[in-house]
Image (cartoon, rainbow, N blue to C red):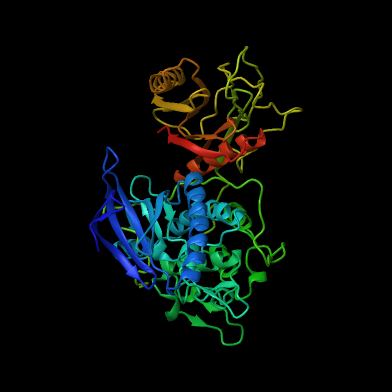
Amino acid sequence: MQTLLNNRYQVIGKLGGGGFGETFLAKDIQMPSNRNCVIKQLKPIHNNTQIYQLVQERFQREAAILEDLGDFSEQIPRLYAYFQSSGQFYLVQEWIQGDTLTTKMQQQGLFSESAVSGILVNLLPTLEYVHSKGIIHRDIKPDNIILRHRDGKPVLIDFGAVRETMGTVVNSQGNPTSSIVIGTPGYMASEQAAGRPVFSSDLYSLGITAIYLLTGKQPQDLQVDPRTGEIIWHTTALNVSPALIAIINRMIAYHPRDRFATAREMLEVLLSPPTEIPPPTQPHYSQPPRLNTPPPVTPQNTTPVTPIPAYQADNQADGKKKIPMGSIIAGGLIGGLLMAGFLFKQVPQSLVGQPETQQTTSSSEPTTEPSESPSPTQSPSPENTVPSTTDPTPTPSPTSATTDVFGAISYSPSKRIYGSATASSREAAENDAREDCEQKSGVKDCAVPVWFKNAWGALAVGSNGAYGSGWGYNRRNPSLGRLAAERYAIQTCQRYKGTNCRVVFSTEAR
């Protein structure tokens, strides 16, 4: 293996390998930072001119899809480049510093129910976005989920479609087809093993991954009901609630029609109060449907991460309690006003004029669920809505505290740069956040769309310039307050016609 690829990437070491090629850690010597990157070297299994041309065309298409996925979601590695050399194909991707779930299991043992629930909640929005693009991952397993060191979020790596292109052949009718099945035995659903994966095949693989984290058992070590083909696993899982058992059982149902139809449906059930898991309500998709508005990736993983680097490799050895949402309080912002749990906000890209003012009252008592903002008669559009710094009704404190901590997030719509701060008073937090934003952006149009007390705050921005904010708090599990804040920030952004809304920042005042 040459040490310099494409006259740019200096190979540091080998990360893994398999039947389709090898994976290397390298540094980009043409970048000022000499940043590290992962290079996947792929080689077609058949070597003739006709097939090589087909592989080349499919490889280019799949690389474009990877670029799109990585640019939208921060929980999918970004594609930096792709190239061909000496009959082989190369992908240059973002290097994720973190530990795979397999490594974490080896380090800490079994995962708790709350940790597994957090991983599921974090990954499902990413998976929904992937599916909205008509893409099925096809190789979800513990080795292909990395818990990133810097924020603890799970990152989904090693999509199967690019590897599948390396198995391209021409059938007897002269049409290109794949001669290989992508996936890992045990983590693959039966329809995927037969070469007909569907969206819920990924949910099946994610469910088997959850079982591994809760029990420590590989799929081949689990019992199977000989009459139904269903996996019997919960008898070996300790301290797992009936609610989470029911969710996972539906994920790993033998027939696709008995699983969750979409990642969104599963996420809604996972976040709902503990109730009986409803039966499937949507038809099984024979072809991947296209969704108009994919969700961004927002939640925070609740599993702590230790700083021991692990790297992505193509073929490594495989070696909920229902989340109570009753104590979550969340809020949004409307027309520039920040109201605890009720106000929503929308931002234009370039604006002139005076801020609009609207005030809504909210209860000082925590609600049983994050309450949505009442819909205004006319939703403001990005063209005519201006950030407002009007003094809103104070956010009710989610709980009594010896020392209240206030937080604020400031945002410049013209530069799309944010600032933040925490302080002992609301005024100080807002002033400091605005100053932080102005220093970073170099402009004076920074407004404070959200402030919060002893809680989480979040800011979501759409690709068309619209944005939304929210705050959240969970008495039993503070980390779920972030999930509530981010969820409402995204809903706010989407409510006011934000496109491709995603959380750009969240922070806690504590």
Horizontal relation, residue 499 to residue 19: left or right: right
Q: Residue furthest top?
A: 354
Is there any visible trace of residue 309 in the rendered image? no
Q: Is residue 357 above or below residue 306?
A: above
Q: Residue furthest right?
A: 377
Q: Position of residue 328 (x, y in %)?
A: 55, 42
Q: Position of residue 202 (x, y in %)?
A: 54, 65
Q: Is residue 44 above or below residue 97?
A: below
Is there any visible trace of residue 178 in the rendered image? yes
Q: Position of residue 227 (x, y in %)?
A: 61, 87
Quadrant including the C terminus: top left
**Depth order, front residue of 327/222:** 222
Quadrant including the N terminus: bottom left
**Depth order, front residue of 488/183:** 183
- Residue sitting at x 41%, y 65%: 142
Q: Position of residue 121 (x, y in %)?
A: 51, 53
Horizontal relation, residue 3 to residue 87: left or right: left
**Depth order, front residue of 81/493:** 81
Q: Is residue 57 above or below residue 211?
A: above
Horizontal relation, residue 25 to residue 331: left or right: left
